[in-house]
Amino acid sequence: MADASTPTEENPLAEGLERLPVHPTILMIFGGTGDLAQRKLLPAIYNLAHEGALPERFHLIGNARGELSDDDYREIARESIEAHSRRRPDPQVLETLLEGMRFVSGSFDDPAVYERLGDVANELDEAAGITFNRVYYLSTAPSFFAVIVGRLGEHGLDSHDDAEVRVVIEKPIGTNLVEAKQLNSAVLDVLDEAQVFRIDHYLGKETVQNVLAFRFANGLFEPIWNRNYVDSVQITAAEDIGIGSRAGYYDSSGALRDLVQNHMLQLLCLLCMEPPVNFSADEVRDEKVKVLHAIEPPTTGTVPQMAVRAQYARGVAGGEDAGGYLEEDDVPEHSTTETYAALRLEVDNWRWAGVPIYLRTGKRLTRKVTEIAITLKPVPHLAFAQDGAVGVQPNQIVLTVQPNEGASISLGAKIPGTRMRIRPVNMEFLYGTAFMSQSPEAYERLIMDAMRGEATLFTRDDEVEAQWRIVDPILEAWADDDGEVAQYESGSNGPEAADALLYAGHRWRAI
Amino acid sequence: MRFCTPATAGGRSDDGARDPRAGAVTVSDGIWSARDTAPSEVEAALRELLRQRHAESEAYVPARVLNLVVIADREWRGEIQNRLDHVGRYHASRTILCAVEPGRTTIDAHVSASADDDPAGEAPSVGRERVVLELGPQHLGRLDAIVDPLVVTDLATLVWAPHGHPEALDALMRLAQIVLLDSGSEPDPAAAAARARELAQRAYIVDLSWLRSTPWRERVASTFDPAQWRRELASITGVTVRHHPGSVLSGLLFIGWLCRRLGWEPGSVVGSEGVMHGSAHGRRQDVELCLKADESMSSPGLAGITVDTASGMGLSLDRGHGGLTAKRRDRRGRESTWTVMGASRGEPGILGEGIRQALLRDKSYGPALSAATAMLS
């Protein structure tokens, strides 16, 4: 039986509750009127309020440059929530949430902003008779991350008596290793690592987290999850759309920075990591970092053998003629930014040595899909005659992250008839058929975790830097390459040049 | 829908006392119906219906989560179906509704397979099956034999008997792993608690009366979570629970939960005309307990709670706009009021939550129920 006699002990009322208590919190959003805040953060916060998941006492303070009153900001928040919430807002819950919102106007480098933020938070503490935790959410351009954290430190907002102070930082953490180190250094000059929550929203997706459940909750897979049984791995993040109106961002980023350095390397880590001792933040992240360290970064000289880049050219996408990347609005005429990147990596450790791990991502490919495909080695001896049938194919385990979340295993099965002929069949599991509940938006989970101080689904400083250590030489080699960037037809499976990365007997899965 | 199978076209043939309507099988708008039928025919119809749906569209995929068997009075069948239709996303994948009609000697059946979305595109369209069996009281004692062929093997089976029929529930315990009940709907709370404890020996219990107290338990746990308030848990001197007149057991389960979590020994509660009093023996002091019926409440559940401590601190939570209205008085007498946000789930939401909880395991209910039983003894 729990004993409540001393305040330092665990809350005895919390045990057994599905929704654990979270300390009263003030969430301050820098960039509170920006696109991310309006499309994702504010709707996510509303949905948490609707479900009763927010801390029992909660306030939100928005910050942006525009001169807005509290009521102006509430109106912006209302419209954002009504437009983007995954459920129709309950008017009473929405009104209550909006009543607790405040706004502090001013630019991110303006010291007065921080004075005012501190004052407003202290006023809320005073009115409530408690000390709220503070969570600062940096939903701004990356160039402001260090500025904001520096100002928080200068104004003493980086810590608070009797309260936790946490800072959530959106990606990207730098555009290369040097910048990532500089940013991490600037942030950690002010804050402890335990206060920093670097978001990679992929980790907030249920199906990404399920990679761990799939591996570590099923005795079926772990015995074969190694170089003795796995022949190769393919991780694909394909999109069927072009860059749309994002030329300004995308042309300075490219596919490698946009998806490979963060999301795809995270998928690789979850797939390849050793079982952690427990699922605490540092145990899990330690294992992920070990995987990244086991990948030998290429040299600029070896990049052509392990990486391919390309741009989409004219073609047919979605049944309609589609222009090429260089024809998109605001893309420089001679841009060499890649819209497709494919890599071959190897994790040089006891479990994975010698197993090629192929990564590819691209815009305007055949269809939208994110998946991990693990191909097992063929059976050592085949007792069946193969003539007249497709024959026995190596088993494949495919974990689909989106859009049709699930898992499938290909198996050899006998074709009905009088002869023993084999062809592959699929055994499929679809999330939608097996769970009644609707997955929350990734941001709902991540915002709650940040308020709770649970960092497992956030990236640590050494993790980010280890990711850049792998990607940096590729970026440098491509920057130094004066040759033409390969092209692939819009609506296709990608450039033929990517086939050169594959070892003998391997082929890319159809997208 | 194009569906007619010879295997199901004849109705029962081995029954000497055939209903004059026997043999009537109809298929209309995707619903297979048969009079005076048998479980094997219904099962065959289900299989054929699924085959047909998949042949029409490969995107059709049957959900495989949970079997739900409902035993209800036939005259209230529509109301039960309506409640099940409004549980939101928490539909069971196969629902078997047994509508009991006094005097009926044969079984009629209606079978349908529907999809969440039109299974036309590339994305999977998740489908669910519904079976309605119209049967008589004499079928209830052997309902397991009737239902067994109709549940999806290897899926958990949840049984719900909102109109009583204990003999049906007892018969189905061989098949079911989970029983959904609403202990608060029984007129005698002591008998309801005893029945729940008896069933809990044989299956996992999901009690809607317990689920109605969930937001209150979460809020109280949150309110006392900050270290400065947590120490007050040890000095609680009084708990008052305000409840719907028919929800005294929800209130007792809430207090039972506090007793078990805080190490109080509950004594009996006594009273009349909507007010019950009792006490629990705490480690430092006795705790006064009070349950008050709130006649103004229109739906089952709790209306509010008040917790007082020896230091003078007090906390009240009451239903309000946009969530629960919280009022705290600190030891200096200073009061603060705020709203703990959350949308009301309503009764359909409670039922949906009950279905969702069938696949989870809440270890707090059993101890709370035993404490509630002790208070009623």
Image (cartoon, coloured by chain):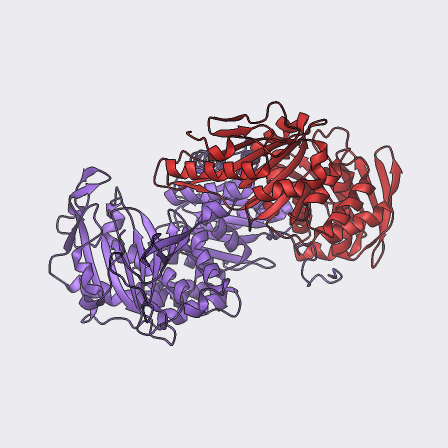
Chain colours: A purple, B red
Instruction: Please tell me which residue lies in front, B64 or A53.
Output: B64
Q: Residue at x 46, y 39 (%)?
A: B50
Task: Tell me how many marks there are.
Answer: 0
Residue B21 placement, left or right of A371: right
Image quarter of residue A468: bottom left
Instruction: Please tell me which residue lies in front, B83 or A447.
Output: B83
Task: Give the percent coordinates (x, y) of residue A454.
Answer: 52, 59
The extreme bottom residue here reads A350
A259 versus B56 height, above or below: below
Q: Residue at x 50, y 53 (%)?
A: A135
- The reply to whether residue A365 is visible in this rendering is yes
The extreme left residue here reads A483
Instruction: Please tell me which residue lies in front, B373 or A343.
Output: B373
Image quarter of residue A38: top left
Instruction: Please tell me which residue lies in front, A260 or A333.
Output: A260
- The reply to whether residue B350 is visible in this rendering is no
Task: Give the percent coordinates (x, y) of residue B166.
Answer: 74, 39
Q: Quadrant of the N terminus of chain B?
A: top left
A171 versus A506 height, above or below: above
Residue B190 placement, left or right of B1: right
Task: Give the percent coordinates (x, y) of residue A110.
Answer: 40, 50
Residue B334 placement, left or right of A379: right
Q: Residue at x 11, y 61 (%)?
A: A482
Task: Give the percent coordinates (x, y) of residue A205.
Answer: 44, 52
